[in-house]
Each structure stands twice: as structure tokens, then as C-alpha cells.
Image (cartoon, rainbow, N blue to C red):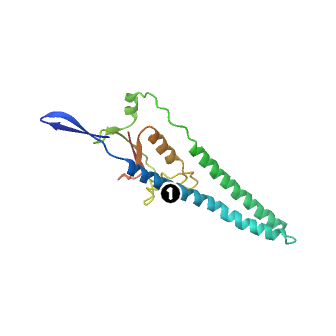
Amino acid sequence: MRRQSLAVDGQAQSLLALVPLESELEAESLLAWQQLVQVLTHEIMNSLTPIRSLSQTALALSEEPGAEAQLRSALDAIARRAESLAGFVGTCRRVSQWPAPVLAPVDVRALFARVQARQSRGGRLQIGVRDDGPGVPPGLERQIFLPFFSAREGGQGIGLTVVRQLVNGMGGRVRHVRPLEGGAAFVLSF
């Protein structure tokens, strides 16, 4: 439902309109599943390909006399790749089992003292959040909300996924906006 304020014969009125969202939600859901499957297969294949190759190498080395050191090195590399894959699966499990948000009363005055909040034209509350870091690299704006995607070296790629999940659980949405001054900026709408 969308609400728009207007004046009719000098009196304030509200126009309410029902907007069908099914097709938009289905398209968004399908895109999210496709992106998730793409990320999962990429990460899994990044570990399985070297494990397969190293296993074949280790098998060949096991038949060569005097290749114990090389065999040990290949087996150690397989163990490290398997450990990395297990860590990835553990992260997937944690993200998929994130608890639902619990709504609670908030002292709005204290909240507004810390953040800048405004209403959009549709009457929704909007909260802007910014930092002064390097910002989101151009071209990656659509990928930053994907689980396990990170533009940062060593990043796990779950932060914005968790934010989106929490905001959506509270009936809102979050989107990235590119500020003119640099840094990263997001708008939360409720």
C-alpha cells in the first residue's frame, strides 16, 4: 500500500493505493536464488578443483619411491583446502540460521539525537547511514548484498547480508547510494 498526502478544496487528504508486488517480489527472489547459487558454486569449486588435482598428484606420488616429502606436501595442501571449504560451509550455516529480529520499543528522542531521520514522499521513515572509508568500488553495487561477497581482502561477506536480513525482518529495506563526498552510504526505509 502506498500513501500520498494531497489537498482537495484546501483540506488535507490522503490517497491510498494498493500496488501489486507479487511479480516484483518473484523476480527479486529468483534473482537472489540465482546469485546465491552462483556464489556457492564458485566458492565450492575454488576448493574442490585443487583438492581433486592434489589428490591425483598424491595418488601418483604414492607409487614413486622416495617421494614421501612431496606426498606429504600434497596431502597437507589437500587438508588446508578442505579446512577452508569447511570454514566456508560453517559461515553459510551461521548466516542461514540467523535469528529473526525481535521488535522492541525504542526511545525515539534518543534515537533521533544520534541519527538523521526523515520521511520519504510515500510516508516511509528513511534513515541514512554513512562512513568515511573508501566506499563501494564502482560496478560492485549490486553484488555487495550477496552472501559471502566481499570487496575487502580477508572479508567474509556477511555484514551487509545480515543488515539486509535484519532490516527486511523489521518490514524495511536497505539500499546503497553513492554519496558525492565519498565513503559508503546506505538508506534504510521503513
Residue 110 found in image quarter: top left
Residue sitting at x 73%, y 61%: 77
> On screen, 101 above or below 54?
above
Quarter of the picture containing the C terminus is top left
Estimate the x, y position of residue 118 in percent, counting from the top left: 32, 38
Q: Callout 1, which amino acid?
A: Gln
Element type at marker 1? helix
User: Can I make out residue 151 in this image?
Assistant: no
Closer-to-camera residue (134/136):
136
Residue sitting at x 46%, y 39%: 169
Label 1 crowd (10 A; few <14 / some 14-19 / many >=20) = few
Residue 67 found in image quarter: bottom right
- What residue occupies the far bottom of the structure in this picture? 64
Estimate the x, y position of residue 134 in percent, counting from the top left: 45, 54
Residue sitting at x 38%, y 51%: 24
- What residue occupies the far right of the structure in this picture? 65
Closer-to-camera residue (100/66):
100
Residue sitting at x 40%, y 34%: 114
Q: Which residue is mark 1?
A: 34
> On screen, 147 above or below 6?
below
- What residue occupies the far left of the structure in this picture? 9
Estimate the x, y position of residue 177 in percent, counting from the top left: 38, 51
Quarter of the picture containing the N terminus is top left
Q: Is residue 174 left or right of residue 92?
A: left
